Image: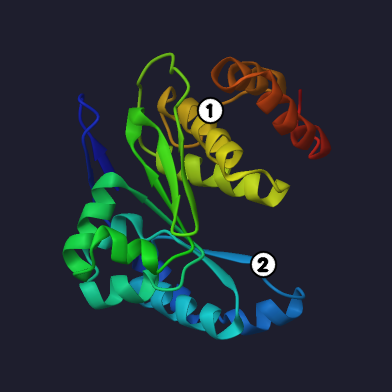
Amino acid sequence: MVTTDSEMNQIASFYPGATSEAREIELAPIHEAIGGIDLLIVSPDDPEAMLRHTEVAHQLGISIIADPSQQLAWLDGEKIRALIDGATYLFMNEYELGIAIQKTGWSDSEILDRVKYRVVTMGSDGARIESKSAATISITVPQEKGKVDPTGVGDAFRSGFIAGLSWGLSHQLCAQVGAMLATYVIETKGTQEYRFSATEFLDRFAAAYGGDAAKEVGAHLAKSGFDR
């Protein structure tokens, strides 16, 4: 449960309940049945499941997106280190990165050493994609029509980013797609209640990031059959 006040401050509460059974999901048979998992995202879930699936994914050579998010508050340093170490992508906001630094005992640079790419969201200041092997990429966020409810903004950013990865887009475009989708969420009450057509999305995307960027994203939306 996420409680949000009028200043957009949030308190997250989590009770695993039935999701504790997630630890019983076996990745290896799924990996074999579908001919290989390309990329596995480990998001907030039953902590035991998160750790188990991370370990098995490493054993199977599956690339991991580490997204510990709200569970950082409950996990100890050893478990956070296990979730982060060796990830292909690590997603965090600035506050979560601070918690990770405090609990793991690793510095900002040491955390970056242990992942291939680190994606840090910074609210209205945008996002940055960092890597030890490449220059940092920074993006701005589109102008929102109004701040209604920030709940689900991070999930929307990640889903847009991952969609971009599946389309083979550059990291900059991936982050911009995520930021555009997140903007729709913050304008809407409810985490998945936003609505838009492909044309509406691309018009706003072009206004924020330029026509060439919108054209490249639009080609993939068209292939996906998204309603214009």
Which of marks 2 and 1 precedes in the sequence? Answer: 2
| Image coords of residue 29 (percent x, y) | 66, 83
**Rendered image: mark on residue 47:** none
**Rendered image: mark on residue 194:** 1
Residue 76, compared with residue 160, is above or below; it is: below
Q: Classify residue 108 as left or right of residue 199.
A: left
| Image coords of residue 61 (percent x, y) | 60, 79
Q: Residues within 10 Å of mark 2 (few under 14, many from 20)?
A: few
The amino acid sitting under disc 1 is Tyr
Q: Pick the quarter of the image with the C terminus.
A: top right
Which residue lies at the image location 66% right of the left edge and 22% below the top edge? 202
List the residue tagged with mark 2: 38
Question: Is the residue under label 2 in contact with that under label 1 (CB below 8 Å)?
Answer: no
Report the front residue among 99 and 145. 99
Residue 51, compared with residue 166, is above or below; it is: below
Marks 1 and 2, how far apart in space?
Answer: 29 Å
- Disc 1 is placed on an element classified as loop
| Image coords of residue 54 (percent x, y) | 46, 76
The mark total stands at 2
> Which picture quadrant has residue 172?
top right
> Which picture quadrant has residue 35?
bottom right
| Image coords of residue 10 (percent x, y) | 23, 39
Which residue lies at the image location 35% right of the left edge and 20% below the top edge? 147
Report the front residue among 29 and 106. 106
Q: Residues within 10 Å of mark 1 (few under 14, many from 20)?
A: some
